[in-house]
Image (tube, rainbow, N blue to C red):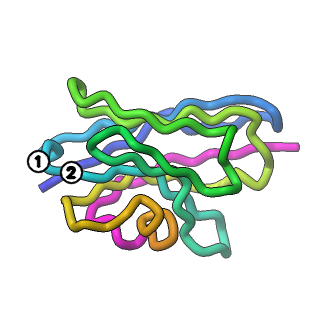
Amino acid sequence: QVRLVESGGGSVQAGGSLRLSCAGSGDTNNMANMGWVRQAPGKEREGVAVIDSDGRTSYADSVQGRFTISKDNDTNTLSLEMNSLKPEDTAMYYCAADRPRGLSLLHYLARPGRFAYRGQGTQVIVSS
């Protein structure tokens, strides 16, 4: 079993920055792919950023160049540095993880529901 707990959300003005963290516990060593998924009210779930066990990353076009995903294997912590935030970044952000299934990073971005594990989420609000 894997448990993921997010932190770091909050309210910020447009142009500001936030750093989200995700603490993993349980069988996290077998998680091949991890990522951040967001969902705004009335909108579909969206893959934001993903990282594999080799540190390769992929981002949604909407956040490319503004967000950075990273992983610390020693502390089982996943992070998302968010800069130049926009009001359209407002959403609940979830940490997600999955075992090795041979799926590409782009697959997880396009189909974030394929992640087997997800945290409870942390709210990000960006005001204009």
- Residue 31: image tag: 2
Front residue of this view, candidates 36 and 127: 36
Marks 2 and 1: which is nearer the front?
2
Q: Magenta stretch: residue 99 in it?
A: no
- Residue underneath mark 1: 27
Residue lying at 76% horizontally and 35% vertically, measured from the top left = 84
Q: State the image quarter where residue 88 is shown.
A: bottom right
Q: Which residue is outermost to the top?
A: 74
Q: Secondary structure at mark 2?
A: loop
Residue 85 vertical placement versus 98 (above, below): above
- Residue 59 lies, in percent from the top left, at 56, 51
Identified by mark 1, the residue type is Asp
Q: Which residues are magenta?
A: 112-128
Q: Is residue 24 left or right of residue 125?
A: left
Front residue of this view, candidates 24 and 108: 108
Q: Is residue 2 left or right of residue 84?
A: left
Residue lying at 23% horizontally and 52% vertically, measured from the top left = 32
Q: Which residue is outermost to the right?
A: 128
